Amino acid sequence: MLAALRPVREVALAAARSAWRAPVHGVLLLLALGLAGLLPLADYLSFLEKRRLVADSLQALWLLSGLAAVGLGACRTVGDELRSGVCGLLVATRLSRTSWLSGKLAGLALLLLPWWLAAAVTQLWGSRLAFDDYRVDWPAARLYWALLLLAVLLATWRAWRGHSFAASLTAAVSLLLPLGLLALGLLPRGAWSGGQLLDWRQLPAVALYYPQWLLGAAVALPLALVGDAVPTLLAGAVVLALGLTADALLSGPVGRSIGWLLPNWQPFQVGDQWVRGGASWGLVQRAWLAGLAQTAALWQLTVAAWAEHELG
Amino acid sequence: MAVERCLEATGVSKQYTDFWGRPTVLAVEALDLVVAPGEVVGLLGPNGSGKSTTVKMLVDLLRPSRGSIRLFGRSPRDPLVKARLGYLPEESCGYPYLTGLETLHFYGRLQGLDGSRLTARVATVLDEVGLRAGRERRVGQYSKGMQRRLGLAQALLGQPALLLLDEPTSGLDPLGRRDVKALIRRLAAAGSAVLLSSHLLAEVEDVCDRLLILHRGRTLASGAVGDLLRQPQGLRATLPQLAPERAAELLAAIRPLDEAATTEPLISRLEAYFLAVVAAAGAEGRDA
Ligand SMILES: Nc1ncnc2c1ncn2[C@@H]1O[C@H](COP(=O)(O)OP(=O)(O)OP(=O)(O)O)[C@@H](O)[C@H]1O
Ligand SMILES: [Mg+2]
């Protein structure tokens, strides 16, 4: 059993490592982190309910950038590898096709871990920045930007030494930002209010990014097997839009029975619930299970459809 | 145990089809091929003659439309067969963002090697293909020749009993070619079977025991290289010490034996000349 999983692990590690090192990954992560730092400062969000607006826009930001990361990752590790002949080489002499596909899905899941961490940290950080409806908590904002700058400097220095900028940036922010979050408790306004000014009720929503991204990976995987990057991302966006509107489109008894077959994003949208005290963890658990089941089903279909496909 | 055949293909054809299943190109037609242990067989043919298609069918990436393929007496789909194969595809073999060393470790681990055995094996193949100096660089930054060497290195990692090499020397410099040819001969001497494809005539002539000439998917000729090239009716004499001015004398002496006899100055092949010049310059460019 464990021996059979070994090739999957190797493929997953190589895929994640390749994806982390791709320059586009670094650019995307930096962009997302930059936006996550700016959004809470934006004027138009400084009304009543600022916390809620900030939380909502951060949710949209992370959902989309995680999906973009996973789409690009799929194009790179699956599409490019298929067309370069490396995939052919692997399945000809070393692996089963199922192991290769499982490894790629697991690799995308690994790729997403730092994104998940970054999303959790910035979401909490944003709640601190927005804790007062009319003022910005500048010390907290300055700390965030200082740490981001430090991470970029560290990554640049590593790139100067010949390492990958994108991978170094990922490592640096994964380390610095969580530490910064802890340090936030010491900042003036916090004055050992500890985590009090952080809105922990956002964590259930953050917990649900991951299954959504995974589902995105399961959609992007078969698309990357047949198409190039741009069609993959476009088709992925269409599926996402369908998924988001699934409940509205597929009402009525017939619609509902079809709806079960489609990837449905609705169960994950618990953003509103946190106002009423946060989504319950039971809901999160059910949505996770639904997401995993849909991911597994899509993956099974992909494996079956690809088993006899020629790799010429 | 009877002497097993590493590879046996009978009546293999490949018809490519379009999206709707309509036939497009008949890439390989009724190919018969046998490779025994210790033998080097060449597939020789111009661009588009079906060499790569043949090799891909042998490694189960493409399904033959007709005919049967057996590797070590089994189906090419058998995992036991895959474990004994070394395959060098026509295209690239690495991940652009991994270093050469990381790539080989990755391939090695997938073949069940690990720990000191893996490290030792990787070091050996790196030396064999002359890639030691470039091992810490990213594959995306490799020159074409270095990529080829990396491909060869991964094919050799598992000490395969049967090597399928699609244009092993394309992109290599003459020194690299000489090394690869020597390497293939060494592997064959150690008992491995090798099937290589090429459109370089000199290469096939130098390294192969037997060859097949393919043209538009059809086998035009096949047999032992020596047999195919020997001209039993003729003879070539080489006189490296004879001054060119004395050619007329020589010709007069041999004309009675053969009306069509000719003489010409001795010219070395450019390859031999190039290798001699580079060797003299002390640039033993074994390592890329
Ligand atoms: N996937 C494919 N679909 C349709 N036709 C193909 C496909 N791959 C190859 N062919 C055709 O099959 C024929 C043989 O191609 P193949 O790649 O086997 O040639 P080759 O001998 O390896 O050529 P080269 O020396 O250029 O590598 C060519 O006419 C080619 O156009
Ligand atoms: Mg070819």
Image: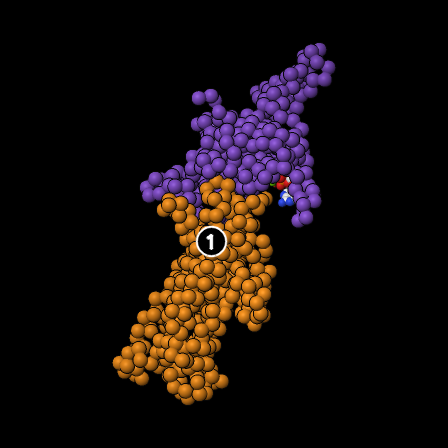
Chain colours: A orange, B purple
Of the pair B211 and A251, the residue shown nearer to us: A251
- Residue type pointed to by label 1: Lys
**Residue at 31% of width from left, 80% of height from top?**
A196
Quarter of the image with the C terminus of chain A in it: top right
- Left or right side of B26 for B197: left
| Tally of marks | 1
**Residue at 63% of width from left, 34% of height from top?**
B66
Q: Residues within 10 Å of mark 1 (few under 14, many from 20)?
A: many
What percent of the width, then of the height, locates residue A21? 45, 58
- Left or right side of A122 for B226: right
Is A160 located above or below residue B85 in the figure?
Answer: below
- Left or right side of B178 for B44: right
What percent of the width, then of the height, locates residue A303? 51, 50
Q: Can the viewer see residue B102 in this picture?
A: no
**Residue at 58% of width from left, 57% of height from top?**
A228
Residue that extends furthest to the right in the rendered view of this protein: B259
Quarter of the image with the N terminus of chain A in it: top left
The quarter of the displayed image where residue A132 is located: bottom left
Residue that extends furthest to the front in the rendered view of this protein: A253
Of the pair B131 and B67, the residue shown nearer to us: B67
What percent of the width, then of the height, locates residue A290? 45, 63
Report which residue position mark 1 lands on: A104
